[in-house]
Image (cartoon, rainbow, N blue to C red):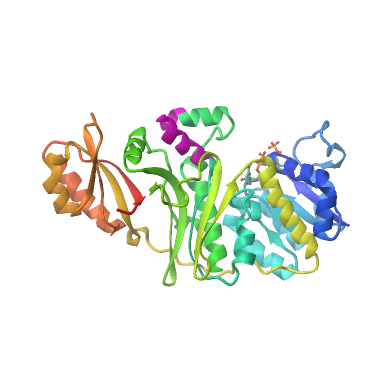
Amino acid sequence: MMYAAIMGYGTIGSGVAQILEESRERIANGAGQEIALKYVLDLRDFPDSPVADRIVHDFQVIESDEQVKLVVETMGGLNPAYPFVKACLNAGKHVVTSNKALVAAHGTELLQIARDKGVNFFFEASVGGGIPIIRTLYRCLRGEEIQEITGILNGTTNYILTKMDREGASFDEVLKEAQDLGYAERNPEADVEGHDTCRKIAILTAMVTGKEVNYEDIYTEGITKITDMDFRYAKEMGASVKLLGSSRRKGGEVCARVAPVMIGKDHPLYAVSGVYNGILVKSDMLGVSMYYGSGAGKLPTASAVVADMIEAAQNEQMNIPIGWGEQRQKVADIKTAECRYFVRIAGTFKEKADLIRRTFGEVRTFVLEGADEFAILTRKMSESEYEKQAAVLDDECRKSGGEGIRQRLRAELED
Ligand SMILES: NC(=O)c1ccc[n+]([C@@H]2O[C@H](COP(=O)([O-])OP(=O)(O)OC[C@H]3O[C@@H](n4cnc5c(N)ncnc54)[C@H](OP(=O)(O)O)[C@@H]3O)[C@@H](O)[C@H]2O)c1
């Protein structure tokens, strides 16, 4: 029998307790021993819950109980999650977390403590919710060289973009609806500004390269500037806009970014809609593989936590080598990254054709009926080249007393 504790009895923590209770026998068979929940740490009491008799408010109770060998952290945030998790690992306890903020900020140190202490620090639920992507990387794709990983990693923003696409609604309208339905936080910044996706792609990149990735090195752009006009063009082009976190190996560096991208119907992530997540992996032998499922939610996420608990119980006496070391991965300057650009420009193509040719060369053009603007799709170019040409275009438009570029999005579209 292995005794466990849960820290944080919120959405995910209560889901973990529920699965441990409802699937007790299956979990015991998988783990090779029963996993018994001894404590649940939270700020509140839950008198009507099934764990009412196990609620504690003092972390020391868990830390100092030598019987407790496995601790789940589902409190979120860094404080006190970080000092508590560190103390548990130092006390020789296995730790499982769903907390991407913790893993992205302190993963390197926590993984090293786990190695030193011969225990495990697992974090499957921190990326892609219930989708088993972390385990896929360190087990199933162990023999592969992974060249690229691109994902729709945030259900809230994918829900908003899907609604905008299907219903032609504005960003603000859909955000409010998502908040009313509980899909988006009252303070949605971490989701809509791309910070959540950034931490997740940083964790995936570190898993793939075996080196620490500073999430602050990753260029991050959110979806707040996406408008219904963008989706009108997207429809015309047989495309859609998705918030993608991506990282690609380039020599010793990785090109990593978080940004809304125009992708076509032939892109494997095009069909990932609503609150679902999808992760595309390109590796040398397998080629393209994709992982799809519920990226959040009580039971899907708790299911990933429980899978980690089972693996920890199966390997009670040993550290499973996963994650990354202290060496820092170099992230390439975003200015060197190459892609096509979808650009919306005020006025008519006819009056600006020469200027467009001088700046961007040959482009595809798109015109919407009744619109006082048009759009172009450039060839592939580096970010710095795009910025240079866009500045020239804007400058010339301004000199002739008009408006220039209204929107620019990266595009992964074939001709
Ligand atoms: N929700 C999802 O779908 C999802 C999916 C994937 C990953 N995650 C991650 O999982 C973690 C938990 O998310 P959640 O949605 O379950 O959050 P949540 O519902 O807010 O639950 C957190 C719980 O921890 C408690 N808590 C906070 N500070 C504490 C402290 N100092 N001591 C003891 N208990 C404390 C909270 O109590 P109070 O409510 O009283 O503050 C709350 O009950 C986060 O890192 C999140 O990013 C969530």
Magenta-tinted stretch? 156-173
The residue located at (23%, 54%) in the rendering is 388
Where residue 384 appears, as percent x and y from the top left, is 28, 58
Residue 230 visible in rendering? yes
188 left or right, relative to 65: left
The image quadrant where one finds ligand 1 is: top right
The residue located at (57%, 63%) in the rendering is 207
Where residue 119 appears, as percent x and y from the top left, is 75, 65
Camera-side residue: 267 or 115?
A: 267
Magenta segment main secondary structure: helix
Name the quadrant of the N terminus: bottom right
Residue 144 occupies quadrant: bottom right
Q: Considering only vertical position in the picture, is 301 above or below 314?
A: above
375 left or right, relative to 259: left
Residue 48 occupies quadrant: top right
The residue located at (17%, 45%) in the rendering is 395
Residue 36 visible in rendering? no
Instruction: Please tell me how many numbered marks the rendered image carries.
Output: 0
Camera-side residue: 200 or 361?
A: 361
Q: Does the stretch in magenta take in 169?
A: yes
Q: Does the stretch in magenta take in 331?
A: no
Where residue 377 appears, as percent x and y from the top left, is 27, 49
Q: Considering only vertical position in the picture, is 376 above or below 217?
A: above
The residue located at (66%, 64%) in the rendering is 111
Where residue 71 appears, as percent x and y from the top left, is 77, 53
